[in-house]
Image (cartoon, rainbow, N blue to C red):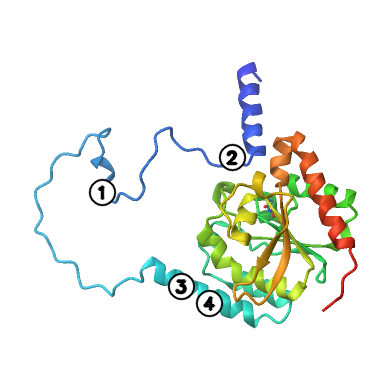
Amino acid sequence: MTVEARAIESLLAFWSDSGVEALYGETAVDRTVTAAPWATASRPAPAAAAPTPRREAPAATPALEAPAAETLALDEARRAAAAAADLEALRAAIAAFDGCALKAGARQAVFSRGRADAPLLIIGEAPGADEDAQGAPFVGRAGQLLDRMLAAAGLTDKVFITNTVFWRPPGNRTPTPAEQALCAPFLERAIRLVKPRVLLLVGGASAKSMLKRSEGILSLRGRWFEWKSEDGALELPALPTLHPSFLLRQPAAKRKSWEDLLILAERLDRPHRPE
Ligand code: URA
């Protein structure tokens, strides 16, 4: 193999490790424009064809507007989540739910792993490639780091782990607030079924969505917040922390995460009265 080929191979491996799975051209393409593709400046227009008589389009049934479709999907998510009597029923309800567009690009739904009665419920952002392949959250490199940190803090057997969305976003992009909102009824049902004492919100996309805050994770991490259910009837202490993927890129930040885990372990050690 030539030196250039080896260099290209190693660059591709680096991108693949970093989650880059799709390559795009250097010029952005506006895919919302519905004009014929040759109607751009860079391509010559085809020879003009003889004008064809214009035909009126048949009256179509009005398509469902996007917001209306989203409202229907959210209603369906709420109904399906509320009907799930236990975590296995909830897992099945998530797998059967077709209202989240992420499902179309994913291999399978990724719901949870861990103890069904865990005192600590960990909420990540979204499944990645390894999770999509294996059907369980945090099983890739970031998950292995998370497991090592939980073990070091003595928390391994105390956790239930899930995400803000249950299907892998394409190219590992951050899930949108709309996608998180559609999955939220299932996540809230999981919280009600597990009945944890504390939530750990891993990464900015999880912390912002669960706490409805706009600050970045570096400002939110290491501080206690109150998570509230949609109806306001349930409240739980929630601690945002850095995402292990970030720690893989910035190992010096592990010290901050360790501080967060100690704060968390101390709270879980406090005596409490079961409800
Ligand atoms: N990152 C997450 O936020 N969740 C996973 O399940 C895996 C990686």
Mark found first going from the N terminus, 4 or 1: 1
Would you say residue 223 is visible in this rendering?
yes
The Cα atoms of the two marked residues, 2 and 4, are separated by: 33 Å
Question: Where does residue 104 sit, x and y in percent of width and height?
Answer: 53, 60
Give neighbour class at mark 4: few <14, some 14-19, many 20+ (Cα, 10 Å). some
CB atoms of marks 2 and 4 within 8 Å = no
Identify the mark at residue 76; answer none if there is no mark.
4
Give neighbour class at mark 1: few <14, some 14-19, many 20+ (Cα, 10 Å). few
- Secondary element at image label 2: loop
Q: Which residue is mark 1?
A: 35
Give neighbour class at mark 2: few <14, some 14-19, many 20+ (Cα, 10 Å). some
Lateral position of residue 19 relative to residue 88, left or right = left
- Secondary element at image label 3: helix
Q: Which residue is mark 3?
A: 71
- In which image quadrant can residue 162 be found? bottom right
Mark found first going from the N terminus, 2 or 4: 2
CB atoms of marks 3 and 2 within 8 Å = no
Query: Mark 2 or mark 4, which is nearer to you?
Result: 4
Question: Where does residue 60 sit, x and y in percent of width and height?
Answer: 25, 72
Question: Where does residue 245 sit, x and y in percent of width and height?
Answer: 70, 43
Q: Measured along the vertical axis of the image, is residue 42 above or below residue 6?
A: below
- Secondary element at image label 1: loop
The Cα atoms of the two marked residues, 1 and 2, are separated by: 30 Å
Mark found first going from the N terminus, 1 or 3: 1
**As rendered, which of 221 and 194 lies closer to the eye?**
221
Q: Measured along the vertical axis of the image, is residue 167 above or below residue 195?
A: above
